[in-house]
Every structure is written in C-alpha cells, then in structure tokens.
Image: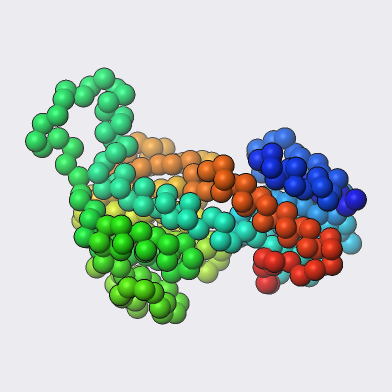
Amino acid sequence: MKKVLFTRPMPEPVVKEARQYFDVTIRQSNLPLTGNDLRNVLRDYDLVMPTLGDMFDRHVFEDVDDPRCKVLANFGVGYNHIDVAAATKAGIAVSNTPGAVTDATADIAVMLMLMSARRAGEGERLVRSGNWEGWHPTQMLGLHMSRKTVGIIGMGRIGQAIARRCFFGFGMTVKYFNRSAKGMEFDAERCDTLEDLAGKVDFLVAAVPGGPETRGMVNASVFAAMQAHGRFINISRGDVVDEPALIEALQEGLIGGAGLDVYAQEPKVPEALKALENVVLLPHLGTAALEVRTSMGMMAVANLVAFDQGKALPNEVEA
C-alpha cells in the first residue's frame, strides 16, 4: 500500500475511505506545515493531502531531489499556497476540490451581507454586554438588503452561486467584474473596471481565487469609489484586499461596513479591525459544515485513488 499523509485531522468517513486503499498517517496538529516538515513529507510519503496554510512554494520543491511524493491532493478549492508550476517541474501532480465548496461558501457570503447590513454582530454584542435597554423605533438602524444592487468580483462557480441567491432570494440587481462575460439565467451587467463596479453597487463581494494576479486588487481606489453606505464582503482570500486600505475606509466612514471571513495573515487579524464595530469578523467558516468538509475530503481521496489506479486525476490543477 502507498503511504499517504493527511496534514490535518479529517472527518472520520474520509479517513475510513482512504484506509481502504492506502496506509494513512494523520498529522494531529491543526497548524500548517512549516520549514523542514514541508520538505520531509515530500521525501517520506507517496501521496499527500495538504490544505490551506501548507506553503509548498518553489523553494520547498527545489530543496527536495527526486521526491517520493507524486501527488498533492489539496483539501480545498483554493491552491495559491502551492506553486503548481514548481510542483509539476518536480514531477508532482496537484489536484483540488472544486464544486464541493460552492454552495457553502456562497451561503457564507450572503450571511455576511445580511450581518453587515443589519448590524447583527454589533447587536449580538450589545445583548451579551447586558447594556440593551429594549426595543425602540430608531434602535440600530441598518441597511435593508432586498432589492438593492450587488456587485460580484469574480463570476466563477462561487460568484454565480452568490448572484443566484441575491437575484432569486432577495430580488437584487446583479453587476459583476470578470475577465470574460458570463451568460446567466437572469440579467447581469458586466462592468469594465473594479472602480466602475464599486460605484454602482450597495454590496461589493470578492469571490476571486487567490494568487499573484488578484493580490491587493481591492485597494484604496476601489473603496474610494464605493458609496458611503456600501458594504464590502470578502469570502475569497485575505490577500485579495489591501487590508490597511480597508481599515482606513472603515475608520473614516468612507464605506458603511464590511463582512470578512478571510484575512491577509490568517489567523492573525489586525487589532484595528477587531476594534471596529462596523465590520463582521468570522474565523474562515466558508466551508465549515460537516457534510461539506466530508465531501471535500472524499473528492481529495478520489484524486489519490485515481492516481494509484493509473487513471487521470478528476480534478487536476494545470500549471
């Protein structure tokens, strides 16, 4: 049996499935692999299931001559923590888990939109503090979400799932920024620039993949273009946003609020963000449902099994 490493504990059905085919080792820490551990797993295991934070950059692959590992079956759709070109050069295939995360991540986006608009986090803190004095007509007035306009940055699977929820669930007008036009079952306007999109919408939602092409794309000029009541939502990757620019926009009241599930230096969250009442902060809950994480794990295992059986990886990532 080939030796497989899971770099984090996994739901039991995923472990059970993998053990039908492989000799499985489960690393018990939930912290990312670092330093020599990254290099050693390439030397010691035939197949590896890494995930967010396991930074397999170019230097890791260059430091390991003739790696034993032949597949990195990433647990997650995002793979910007793996240098796919360097892995391919080293003879290591990379796969991910698209599809399994789409609905769960879209749900979190809509939840953050509602929480930010209706000041849910702030309200919950008020109740827990014991300082709530009871209902009154002007208490904690927020932004009504129905029939507003949403702008989606990135119209891939997740972006389209968010758009459907907004259009059919809340009667919202949909606009988007994407490299190419997307045909959908309802009208959606494609904007030529991020600034153009930002100025036309009530909610601006980032749903792009991470990586060099998108790093810092939501910056000060984008926030300056937003309407004063506008809400910014990020469920993509933390480094898609210029975090200091977002903090300044929130502090100065340039935008109405934000809802974040991801951060530039996870798990570190800037103290300035935590001090603000007009931002909702979640601990990367995008796919945090048991059935979703199980489905992701099963998809990753399917990629490992396919390789072991000499078949094409169902979800191979191209360099």
The one of 314 and 113 positioned closer to us in this rendering: 314
The one of 41 and 93 positioned closer to us in this rendering: 93
**Left or right, residue 194 beside residue 318:** left
Q: Which residue: 21% across, 24% down?
A: 132
Marker count (numbered): 0
| Residue 143 appears in the figure | yes
The quarter of the picture where the C terminus appears is bottom right
- Residue most extreme to the left: 137
Q: Which residue: 52% across, 69% down?
A: 213
In the displayed structure, 92 sits above or below 142; it is below
- Residue most extreme to the top: 130
The one of 213 and 122 positioned closer to us in this rendering: 122
**Left or right, residue 173 beside residue 110:** left
**Left or right, residue 308 beside residue 170:** right
Q: Which residue: 32% across, 73% down?
A: 186
Residue 20 in the image: x percent, y percent? 82, 47
Q: Which residue: 75% across, 47% down?
A: 17
Residue 260 in the image: x percent, y percent? 41, 48
Residue 126 in the image: x percent, y percent? 26, 28
**Left or right, residue 221 beside residue 227:** right
Q: In which quarter of the image is residue 167?
A: bottom left
The one of 67 and 57 positioned closer to us in this rendering: 67
The scheme the figure's colours follow is rainbow
Residue 313 in the image: x percent, y percent? 74, 66
| Residue 51 appears in the figure | no
